[in-house]
Image (cartoon, rainbow, N blue to C red):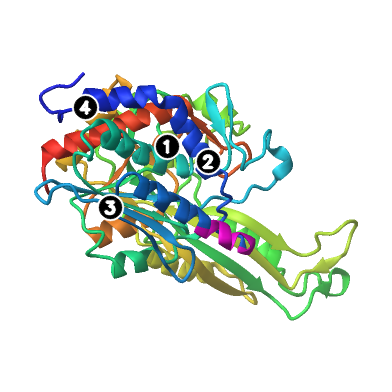
Amino acid sequence: MTDARTAPHLDAVLAFVDRERARFVDDLTAWCRVPSISSSPAHVGEMRRSAEFLVAQFRALGADEATVIETPGHPAAFGEWRVDPALPTVLVYGHHDVQPVDPIEQWSSPPFEPTVRDGRLYGRGVVDDKGQVYIHAKAIEAFVKAGGGKPPVNLKLIVEGEEEIGSEHLDGILREHEERLRADYVVVSDTAMFGRGIPSLCVGLRGIAYWDVKLTAHKLDCHSGSFGGGVPNPATALAEIIAKLHDERGHVTIPGFYDRVRALPESERREIESLPFDEKEFLASTGARAAVGEQGFTTLERLWTRPTLEVNGLSSGWQGPGSKTIVPATASAKLSSRLVPDQDPEEISRLVETHLKRLAPKGVEVEVTFLHGGRPYLAPTEHPVFDVAKRAFSRAFGRPTVFIREGGSIPFVRTIADRTGKPCLLMGFGQPDENAHAPNEWLDLENFHLGIKSVIYLYDEIRALGRS
């Protein structure tokens, strides 16, 4: 029901969403049939078709501007509804590219023929991120067709085509179209809720730094009988170095690594502790036998609010069948860190390189290549738009909204926040186990339906909040 905050026609808008529930799923299915795999050169044409498909939807909903934005890579889709310059403007970010589908044999149904089973829609892109983009598109449709012909706020949607390959040209889009994308509030729907039916606003993301490390001891592999015990073994050296990267309490031993780590407020620690987290269920989902990590913190605290240094891969010496008695010439490792506010990936990279080279034994050369990095994001939750978003989410789902963080990294969020100067509302509607990058990706259709209502309430609440 409407209340003192709501705009006219809101009951009719919500009733329209209930009435058109099945068709909305069919409409999403049509878009998800487009195999917009951004990492595949064979799908360049499909990337354009996907962007043009969405632009056509924007035009059908009466957008004042609907266009494909060209980039040196894959195109983005843009739509704008200009309602009243006195009203606030909301910028919504999403992406229309999807992950590859391999291994195809593990799918229960064709990845680009979305299929409904047991209240879920299965298919590539249904939740990451086409379904979440369509939550906003269908909220707009409800306002246009049942709410007086216009949304309650000015709206801009920018839907890029390269998120799954690092958003290489997003910063360029934001620079080139800075005026066009100017807004009072920014909403990103590309994250998951804490659990089914639990409205959750993600307020923190870890950053990332990634390295390739190579140790070299001699020009060629050496016969272990003729040279073993007389020349350095880089595989052994690498094992010794890695063993020294953490102490017995799980702390990273690199000097300066924790210098910029922002302390976790006691109030947030209590909020995290109050969440219905089942550690046994968490472990069972991976098959792990025990939870490990930095001592002095709970598992959720370690996943969301503490930095890490992980070994992602190791390689050295003979890996084929049978035996080959050598002292390998080289050894290599892939290392990565998840970073938290206020760590900087470039600074951490310098510290890591210095420390690895300091640990190298005599006769072993260490080469460290910084492959990529992304900065962490922590939302300014004291901003009034977060209270508005919590209220909107709760109105749709009928229970209190919780603040959560995400252990993964979405570097474009920090890019958008820095470029626009606005806090990003991470209002996602996925599930933690939705197989977003794996076979049998799925979208909870109840979340899809209530997500549309959440966005309707959000736009309505922001209208009442006014311009920032």
Camera-nearest residue between 349 and 85: 85
- What percent of the width, then of the height, locates residue 152? 19, 39
Residue 367 sits above or below residue 452 on the image: below
Q: Judge from the rendering whether residue 253 lies leftward or rightward of residue 225; answer left or right.
A: left
Q: Looking at the image, is mark 4 or mark 2 earlier in the sequence?
A: 4
Per the image, the residue denoted by label 4 is 10
Q: Secondary structure at mark 3?
A: strand
Q: Looking at the image, is mark 4 or mark 3 earlier in the sequence?
A: 4
Per the image, the residue denoted by label 2 is 30
Q: Secondary structure at mark 4?
A: helix
**For residue 317, which quarter of the picture?**
bottom right
Closest to the camera, between mark 1 and mark 3, is: 3
Amino acid type, residue under disc 1 in the picture: Ala
Query: Over which residues does the magenta segment extend?
Result: 41-48
Per the image, the residue denoted by label 3 is 80
Callout 4: few (<14), some (14-19), or many (20+) C-alpha neighbours within 10 Å?
many
Separation of residues labelled 4 and 3 (CA atoms): 21 Å
Identify which residue is drawn at 24% across, 35% down.
458
**For residue 450, which quarter of the picture?**
top left
Separation of residues labelled 1 and 2 (CA atoms): 23 Å
Q: Secondary structure at mark 1?
A: loop
Q: Looking at the image, is mark 1 or mark 2 earlier in the sequence?
A: 2
Residue 395 included in the magenta stretch of the image:
no
Residue 21's label in the rendered image is: none
Amino acid type, residue under disc 2 in the picture: Ala
Identify which residue is drawn at 69% across, 75% down.
217
Residue 192's label in the rendered image is: 1
